[in-house]
Image (spheres, rainbow, N blue to C red):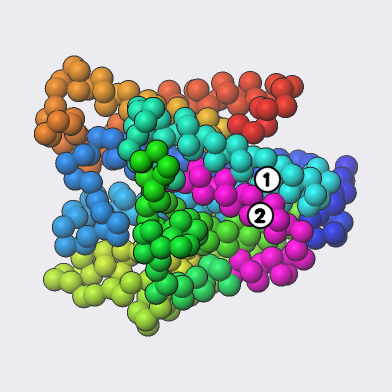
Amino acid sequence: MFKPINAANGNLHVIRPAAARIRIESIDALRGLVILLMLVDHAREFFFIHAQVSDPMDVTATSPALFFTRLTAHLCAPVFVALTGLSAWLYASKKGGAPAASAFLFKRGLFLIFLELTLVNFAWTFSLTPTTVFLQVIWVIGLSMMALAALVHLPRPLLIALGLIIVLGHNLLDPITVAEGAPGHAIWAVLHDRGYIDLPWGGQARTSYPLLPWIGVIALGYGIGPWFVAEGASRRRRLIALGVAMLALFALLRTINLYGDQPWTAQTDLLHTVMSVLNLTKYPPSADFLLATLGIGALLLAALEQAPRRLVGLLAIFGGAPLFFYLIHLYALHLLNLGALVALGPNQGESFSLPGVGWIWLLAVAVAVPGWFACRWFGEVKRHSTKWWMKYL
C-alpha cells in the first residue's frame, strides 16, 4: 500500500502510488499548458514577420493584442525550468537519491545542449552553416541541469537559500558589463549579459538565455520536491501560499519601482500604463519577471490538481512528451511558412505573414491538434520502449 522512498535530502518519506500518479499528471498538465502558449509565440515568430517585437517590448509601438499575446509566453521558460528541477527531485526519489539524479542530470543536460546546436538551430534556420547560432531555451535548460547535477548534493535548506539569492539578487550584477573582445566576455555573456560570442569559423553565437538566473529557478524547483509526497490538500495550500507570496513581492517591487527590473513609467492612458508595469525583462529574466511568472505557475499547478480530469488529461498528453513536441512544432511551423510562400507568395516584403494576432492563435490551434495525436503516439512508444536512450527524449 505504501512505498518508502529515499529523498534527496536524506530523509525517508512515504508516498501513495495512486496519489503520485495524480500529482505527476498535474505537473505534466502544467507543462502542457505552457507548451501551448509557447506554440502561439513561435507561430508569431514564423508568421508575424512584419510585426516582430523587440526585447523588452516597446509599449509605445506594440499593439495591446500583440503585447498580451507575447506576455502569455513569458510563463513558458520559468515554468519549464522550475518543473525540470521538480522532476529531477521526483527522479531522485525513485532512483536512489542525489547520486542517481546527478548522473542523469549531467548526461541529459549535455544531450539538450547538443540538440540546441543541431536539430533546434536547424529547425529555425534550415541552414547547415547559419551566420548566427542562437543559444536559447533548450540550451539553458541543459546547462541548468548540469549545474543542478552539482547542487543536488547540497543540504536542501542551503539549496533553496542559494536559489532565492540568485533569483532575487542577480539584478545587482546588471551594472557589470564586459565588452566584446575583452577577456571574460564569452563567460559573462553565457552567465548574465546577453550578447554575441565570436566563433572560430567566422560566425557568432547569440546567448539569448543567459544562464545564472535559471540556475536559481531550477534549484527552487528541486527544493519544493518534498511537497509532492505530502497530502494533496497540504501541497495545494503550500503552492497557493507560495504563489500569493511571490506575486505580492512582485507587486511591492513594482510599486517601489527601484529594484527588480527597469522602472515602469506612466503612459498616455491606463491600458498602456498597465502594459508598462507588465513589460518585464526576460533576457536575462529579472527578479520581477521570475516572481510574476513563477508565482502564477505555482497557482496554476495548484489549480490543475483540482481541475476536471478530462482537461488535465488532455494537457498532460502534451506535457508528457515536451521535447518531442518542441522539435516537431518548430519544423511544422517552418515548413508551413515555406509552403505558404510557395502557394501564396510573399505578402510582407520577401516573407509571408498573417494579417492579425487572431490568426496567430488560430494557426496555433491548427498545429496543436495533430501535435496532440503525435504526442499521444510518442508517449506510448516511449513508455513501452526498453531502449536506454529513450529516457533522454
Side of 66 relative to 323 (left or right) = left
Residue nearest the observer in this picture, 49 or 2? 49
Q: Amino acid at mark 2?
A: Leu
Q: How far apart are the two marked residues, 2 and 1, measured between alpha carbons?
A: 7 Å
Residue at 48% across, 37% down: 117
Side of 110 relative to 139 (left or right) = right
Side of 141 relative to 154 (left or right) = left
Q: Main secondary structure of the magenta part?
A: helix
Res. 342 in view: yes
Q: Mark 1 sits on what residue? A: 105
| Element type where label 2 sits in the image | helix
Q: Tell me where the magenta segment starts and ends, as one range.
A: 136-164
Precedes in sequence: disc 2 or disc 1? 1
Residue at 36% across, 64% down: 179
Res. 298 in view: no
| Element type where label 1 sits in the image | helix
Q: Mark 2 sits on what residue? A: 148
Q: What percent of the width, then of the height, locates residue 370?
A: 43, 23
Q: Amino acid at mark 1?
A: Leu
Q: How many marks?
A: 2
